[in-house]
Structures are given as C-alpha cells and as structure tokens.
Amino acid sequence: MSTALMVFSIVAVTCGAFFFMAGTIGLLRFPDTLSRLHALTKVDNLGLGLIALGVLPQASWPFGALKIICVWVLAQLAGATVAQLLARLARQNAHDA
C-alpha cells in the first residue's frame, strides 16, 4: 500500500474518531432528549462514514469493500429508525405529562 493511502486512512479514521467523541460529548452535555438524539444520529453517522472511508483502501477488493459499505448503510438505517422511535416515545411522554 502506498504512503498516500496510508496517510489518507489515518486522517479519515482520526477524523471519524473525533466525530464519535463530539457525539458522545453532545450526548452528555445537551439538555433534552431530542438534542441528544440529534447528536448521536448525525455526528456518529458521519464519524462511521469517515472510518469506513478510511478503512476502504485497506480492504480486500471487491467483497471486503462491499461489506464495509453495507455495514455503514445498515448502521445509518438502524440509527435513523431507532432515533425516530425514541423521539416519538419522548414526545408522547412529554405530551402525557
């Protein structure tokens, strides 16, 4: 693997880890449920995307890369679905109270 691809992988994975850290800080610091969900779904999906992008050059082609892309897409779908369900539940609880 070339040095440029290694540097690209290191930078992308480091940026992805930074976004995961930012999402975790948002989860701990934001005051309400909807803001916390926003921090988790948006920032963590971007972080996972950057990590997947950084790992792609090191994957065995084409099946390894396809697996990484499938994991990223499935994580995005699962995160969006769970966030929608949690937001609906939080809104119902706030409305009932």
Image (cartoon, rainbow, N blue to C red):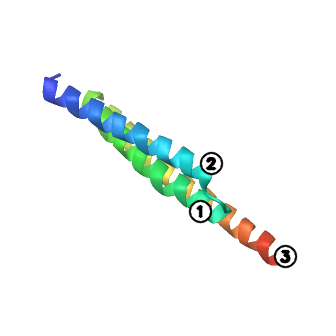
Q: Which residue is mark 2?
A: 28
Q: Is residue 69 left or right of residue 94?
A: left
Q: Position of residue 2 (x, y in %)?
A: 14, 24
Q: Position of residue 45 (x, y in %)?
A: 45, 50
Image quadrant where one finds the C terminus: bottom right
Q: Earlier in the sequence, mark 1 or mark 3?
A: 1
Residue found 67% across the figure and 61% down from its top: 33
Numbered disc in front, either 3 or 2: 2
Image quadrant where one finds the N terminus: top left
Quarter holding residue 80 = bottom right
Q: Using the image, determine if residue 82 lies above or below residue 28.
A: below
Q: Which residue is mark 1?
A: 35
Q: Position of residue 58 (x, y in %)?
A: 27, 27
- Residue toward you, 6 or 71: 6
Q: Which mark is residue 5?
A: none
Q: Which residue is mark 3?
A: 96
Q: Using the image, determine if residue 3 lies above or below residue 69.
A: above
Helix, strand or loop at mark 1: helix
